[in-house]
Amino acid sequence: MPMLIQCTDKEGHLQLRLDNRPTHLAYLEENKAKLLAGGAIMGPDGNPAGSVLIVDTDDAAEAQSFADNDPFSKVGLFETVTVTPWRMAFFNYENKL
């Protein structure tokens, strides 16, 4: 069962996110074989306020390690990081993003 990694940014740290985004995206690209999906959680102001990643593993420790090695984690962007099992119940393949 895949693991959902949900991260919430520390308030007032948008510039830290923006400064480290290229390194974060390179990390995701290097590890894309492990990823099912990912993207930013958007705040009410329209700016990123966190991240969601769905990692193709049933090992919570492996998913936590993946989150810990994310450049965003390494620079202290996140207030919280949670790793939970995720089961897809629905996906509208005809309405892909």
Image (tube, rainbow, N blue to C red):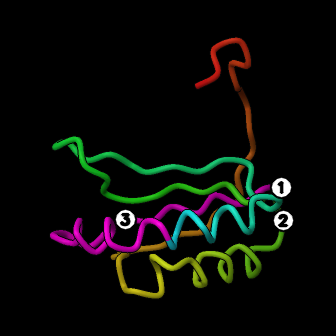
The image quadrant that residue 16 belongs to is bottom left
Q: CA distance from mark 2 to mark 1?
A: 5 Å
Q: Which mark is on residue 94? A: none
Instruction: Classify residue 16 as left or right of residue 25.
Output: left
Which amino acid, by three-letter code, is at mark 2? Asp
Instruction: Classify residue 8 as left or right of residue 88.
Output: left
Residue annotated with mark 1: 1
Instruction: Classify residue 64 as left or right of residue 78.
Output: right
Boundaries of the magenta span: 1-22
Q: CA distance from mark 3 to mark 2?
A: 22 Å
Q: Nearer the viewer, residue 95 or 28?
A: 28
Give the total of numbered labels.
Answer: 3
**Residue at (52%, 69%) from the top-left corner?**
24
Q: Residues within 10 Å of mark 3 (few under 14, many from 20)?
A: some
Give the mark toward the camera: 3 or 1: 3
Residue annotated with mark 2: 58
Q: Residues within 10 Å of mark 1 (few under 14, many from 20)?
A: some
Q: Are marks 2 and 1 in contact (CB under 8 Å)?
A: yes
Residue annotated with mark 3: 8
- The spot of residue 72 in percent (x, y) is 45, 76
Q: Nearer the viewer, residue 86 or 33?
A: 33
Which amino acid, by three-letter code, is at mark 3? Thr
Q: State whether residue 82 is above or below residue 94.
A: below
Give the secondary structure at mark 1. loop
**Residue at (52%, 55%) from the top-left corner?**
52
Q: Which quadrant holds the N terminus?
A: bottom right
Q: Is residue 69 magenta?
A: no
**Residue at (33%, 68%) from the top-left corner?**
17
Q: CA distance from mark 3 to mark 1?
A: 23 Å
- The spot of residue 27 in percent (x, y) is 63, 71
Which amino acid, by three-letter code, is at mark 1? Met
Q: Nearer the viewer, residue 66 or 15?
A: 15
